Image (cartoon, helix red, strand yellow):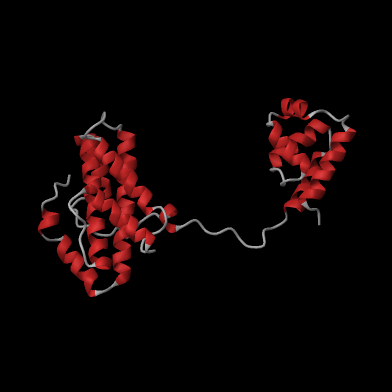
Amino acid sequence: MITPAHFASHLQLLLARAGGPSVRQLATKTGYGKSTISDALAGKRLPTWPVAKALGTAFGADVDDLRERWANAKGKPDTPAPDAPDWLTSVRTDIPDLVTDRGLGEVCASIYAKGPQHAVQASWDVVQTGALQLSHAYYDDIPGSWSSNVVDTYGRAEEDGVLPSGALAVANAIHYHYVGTRMREPLSDDQAVQIVVMAFRLAWQARDAVDKKSTPAAAETLRVAEGPMAEGIDFV
């Protein structure tokens, strides 16, 4: 089997047969950076096929033969690449009830009917509801009155493994724009759509975590969320 080092040696042989053009000359011919070409020739790592092909063409080599050698050097990974996480790729068909009276489609539509700022407010309400459910189900508590307390709840849930990695970053991003709409210029419609989608996905993750727990506390969460606190939220 050809190793990346063997493949680099073959490239060096082709380089010599081509008259030994400099790395700078090869960069001009191939369009790739000097460091990329140097790494390929040094065998530090197997170059990508486009890089290898460009070098082979610059050397006047048999590209089909070079492709076969490259594929042999690449081989097959010992372990398959991990599947993308559900939080990144999932498309919901069983839309959970977030106790918000309005769904994702309606909030997105409100961007054009009532403006981005209104939709961002509704998105924050969704995130806030998710934090309420999480905190009550897992920590027998409710978030404090500050919006930062809502973000902290998602951070705690991520740290404890209740939510997947990245939940805190999403909560922070939504919080930043929620606060910013009151201080900076209004968001564009496209930005608002992204915030709405992020907010609902984060809240669905929270609701899924509550459902998985399936404890009396989880049931109590729904009762609390359906109570006065939820009724006081101005949804679209």
45 relative to 81 in the view: left or right: right
Q: Quadrant of residue 179?
A: top left
Q: How many numbered marks, from 0 up?
A: 0
Residue positioned 27% across, 48% down in the render: 104
Q: Position of residue 177 (x, y in %)?
A: 29, 39
62 relative to 37 in the view: left or right: right
**Image: 122 above or below 95:** above
Residue positioned 88% across, 34% down in the render: 16
Residue 103 is at least partly visible in this image: no
Q: Position of residue 81 (x, y in %)?
A: 58, 58
**Image: 69 above or below 225:** above
Judging depth in this view, the residue of 70 and 165 nearest the camera is 165
Judging depth in this view, the residue of 194 and 65 nearest the camera is 194
In the picture, the quarter occupied by the N terminus is bottom right
Residue positioned 17% across, 60% down in the render: 225
Judging depth in this view, the residue of 118 and 105 nearest the camera is 118
In the picture, the quarter occupied by the C terminus is top left
Residue positioned 37% across, 64% down in the render: 160
Q: Quadrant of residue 50?
A: top right
Residue 81 is at least partly visible in this image: yes
59 relative to 105 in the view: left or right: right
Q: Position of residue 66 (x, y in %)?
A: 80, 43
Q: Position of residue 136 (x, y in %)?
A: 22, 65
**Image: 226 above or below 40:** below
Q: Report the residue that reaches farthest toward the bottom.
A: 216
